[in-house]
Image (spheres, rainbow, N blue to C red):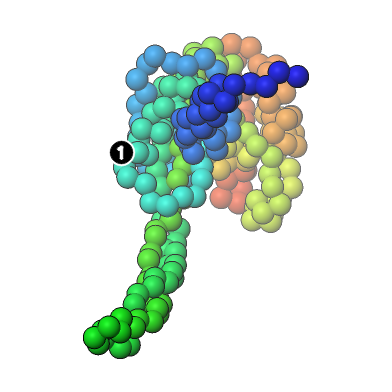
């Protein structure tokens, strides 16, 4: 077996090191779809209330591509912006919500040595020192960093919802709060959609469509798929402890 020249091995190790360094913490923690990079300069929006801002952003017709979150020592604003921008460019996102939430301050104690004079120099006798140690405290602030990447939904995607809303199943906590087990929880209502104009809101629970009982998110989606364009349907929603019927015209 031939041995590789030392110079080649050194070059390979150098390339590997720089390759690892070039991948940001934001990129290493990315979860989501991977697509072709983008040449469009992304719009970066700082968020101090990410749960609300995500909901607001998605109602405006933006689709989540992926996200990244991690805990690290305090970043400079410029470094964070640069990592979020690069993440958008790598995954074809046109918009990003990003921010940081303070987590904790970590205080560490280290010890440094210093010399203490015991006996000064006298004649031919050298000075005598002893080594002692003293504590040195340092503090570092840690933050939870996050970035959520988006692209605008196409008109076809929006039209595909027909009524302009998305659903999820009732979880145990919501069942307990609502005192009911069946229905499809409205998790999203897109702005200016038929559901939006008809005043169906996030948090409503759809219990029937045209009289057909809705058990969960899947049955709501199946019922809506059967609708044709411009069809007016009666959507029964559970809101504030009672059911009410709302007429909605499909796109």
The crowding category of the residue bearing disc 1, from other C-alpha atoms within 10 Å (few below 14, some 14 to 19, many at least 20), is few
Number of labels in the image equals: 1
Quadrant of the image occupied by residue 131:
bottom left
Which quadrant would the N terminus be assigned to in this image? top right
- Which percent across, then down, holds residue 93? 45, 23
Disc 1 secondary structure class = helix
Residue most toward the left? 123
Q: Which residue is mark 1?
A: 78
Which residue is pictured at 53% across the width and 23% down the height?
7
Asked if 123 appears above or below 52 in the picture, the reply is below
Work out which quarter of the rendered image holds the C terminus and state it.
top right
The image quarter containing residue 162 is top right
Q: Residue at x 63, y 21 (%)?
A: 4
Q: Residue shown at 75%/37% (left/top)?
A: 215
- Where residue 46 sits: x, y (%)? 35, 39
- Position of 243 with respect to 94 (left or right) is right
The residue sitting at 49% across, 13% down in the picture is 155
Rendered location of residue 246, percent (x, y): 56, 32
Depth order, front residue of 51/78:
78
- In the image, 92 versus 62, the foreground residue is 92
- In this rendering, the answer to whether 196 lies above or below 47 is above
- Residue 107 in sight in this render: yes
> Picture coordinates of residue 182 (x, y %)?
73, 43
Q: Nearer the viewer, residue 95 or 3?
A: 3
Furthest residue toward front: 124
Asked whether 52 or 188 is in front, the reply is: 52
Tell me if I can see residue 61 in this picture: no
């Amino acid at each position: 077996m031939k041995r590789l020249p030392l110079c080649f091995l050194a070059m390979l190790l150098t390339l590997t090191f720089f390759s690892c360094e070039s991948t940001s913490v934001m990129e290493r923690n990315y979860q989501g779809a991977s697509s072709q990079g983008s040449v469009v300069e992304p719009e970066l929006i700082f968020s101090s209330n990410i749960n609300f801002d995500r909901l607001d952003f998605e109602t405006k017709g933006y689709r989540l591509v992926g996200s990244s979150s991690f805990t690290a020592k305090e970043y400079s604003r410029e470094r964070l912006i640069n990592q979020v921008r690069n993440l958008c460019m790598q995954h074809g996102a046109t918009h990003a919500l990003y921010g940081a939430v303070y987590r904790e301050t970590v205080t560490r104690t280290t010890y440094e040595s210093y010399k203490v004079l015991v006996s000064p120099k006298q004649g031919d006798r050298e000075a005598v020192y002893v080594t002692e140690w003293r504590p040195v405290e340092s503090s570092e602030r840690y933050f939870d960093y996050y970035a959520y990447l988006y692209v605008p939904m196409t008109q076809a995607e929006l039209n595909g919802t027909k009524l302009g809303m998305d659903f999820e199943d009732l979880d145990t906590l919501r069942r307990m709060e609502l005192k009911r087990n069946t229905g499809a929880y409205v998790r999203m209502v897109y702005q200016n959609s038929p559901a939006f104009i008809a005043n169906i809101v996030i948090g409503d629970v759809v219990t029937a469509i045209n009289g057909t009982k809705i058990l969960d998110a899947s049955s709501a989606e199946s019922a809506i798929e059967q609708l044709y364009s411009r069809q007016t349907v009666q959507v029964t929603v559970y809101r504030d402890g009672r059911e009410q019927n709302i007429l909605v015209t499909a796109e």
